[in-house]
Image (spheres, rainbow, N blue to C red):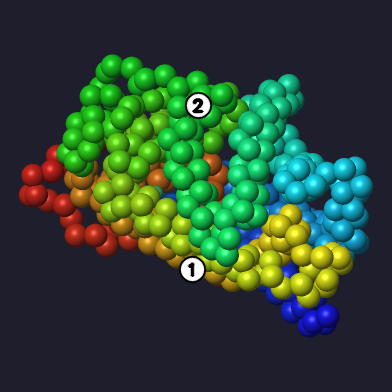
Amino acid sequence: MADWIIPVFLVFFLAQYLVETFLTVLNLRGVKAAGDAVPAPLAGHISTETAGRSSQYTLAKGRLGLAGDAYHTALTLAVLFSGILPWLEAALAQAGLRGPHLFVAFLAILSVALGLANLPFRLTMIFGIETRFGFNRMTWAMWLKDRLKGLALSAALGLPLLYGVYAFMAFTGRWWWVWLFCFLTAFQLAMVWLYPVVIAPLFNKFTPLPEGELRTRVLALAGKAGFRPRGLFLMDASRRSGHSNAYFTGFFRPRIVLFDTLLEKVSTDQALAVLAHEMGHYRARHVHKALALNLAASLATLYVLSLAIGWAPLFAAFGFPAPGYHSALALLMLCGGAFTFFLAPLAAWFSRRNEYQADAFAVALSGGKEALGSALVRLNDDNLANLHPHPWYVRFHYSHPPLLERLAAMEALAPATGSGHRPAGA
Ligand SMILES: [Zn+2]
């Protein structure tokens, strides 16, 4: 038995926990020290009351996050080293399950159990913190209904998917990981198509954006940006939460979805600037690049998995009597994050770079910085986003640049004058 396996794993796993905790503590200290201070460039745009509330919100979420991380770390170690996984394997085999059925049952039970174990933190987040700060609009009954629907959906999609995964692992020979990659890619693409048509409508109502000034101007803006959207929808996000947003789905002719909460809060000019930003992501092919990176990462993961499966000492180290497809996936699920965690800054950097590009596109398309700038301030305000994030925390965790840096980057853009663009809105 290779007795270095567990120590190496523990070094990575605990390093992840310590770095994560250190960054969060650093971030929260800065927020606590800042209190209700408004950063100088935003004076007059954000009130000290809002700044104080956003600090309180960040602190509340951060403290829950610290407790959650400690709990999650202890739980993962307990699952890995208590012997419960080999016990579950033996119990399922004893109950007469073999091959694909054992594989599916093992992974389904593990996922459901881990989901249940995380429940106290998710509930505290929604019904504790989000309610306290006025974001949550869900009742317990609604939440329960959502969860049951989610569970049914996971069973309907996840169980056949798992049987498929087993079939590719067991029956396609030595290049199984390449075949499985093709299968998972096809599944993912099918989901991109299925999600807006079948899945999202199970949880929210989507109505075509009504005729009027906003609709006319969004379509004109899309035309100017060079694409015809597949549809323009308003989503009833306000049923569950006060957080506001807009998103695009689809690869070539996207659907544009606006949260009703966004329209409650911003002017038409500001909403158009937010949509121009989303269009920027499409024109710069960020969605396609992110998908390509995702697929490359999943191919690399499957390759590593193919090496791990043939390596008996790994399974012995975690107490399994013999290698198995189900135990390999369970170990990947529980241990994998410790090894990929240190790539997080790279992914976050790529995402922030895309945000800057989309902002620049939006400014050029709508001809002014005022609408987007004020929309970002407004959304930051309404979502109580942290005004004082620590730069190291940002490096690791921020997929979007902090407000001040985004505004500064926009200010540094060349003024869009005399290029035939419509002047900035009011
Ligand atoms: Zn964006």
Residue 122: image location, x then y, percent: 72, 42
The amino acid at mark 1 is Leu
Task: In the displayed orientation, state which residue is furthest to the top.
Answer: 211
Image height of 235 relative to 348, above or below: above
Which quadrant of the figure has residue 170? bottom right
Callout count: 2
Residue name at image x 8 percent, y 44 percent: 420
State the residue in front, 126 or 48.
126
Image height of 420 relative to 344, above or below: above
Judge left or right: residue 384 versus residue 276: right
Residue 424: image location, x then y, percent: 21, 41
The amino acid at mark 2 is Val
Residue name at image x 80 percent, y 47 percent: 98
Image height of 162 relative to 348, above or below: above
State the residue in front, 353 or 113.
113
Residue name at image x 34 percent, y 27 percent: 232
Residue 280: image location, x then y, percent: 29, 48
Disc 2 crowd rating (10 Å Cα; few below 14, some 14-19, many 20+) is: few
State the residue in front, 360 or 232.
232
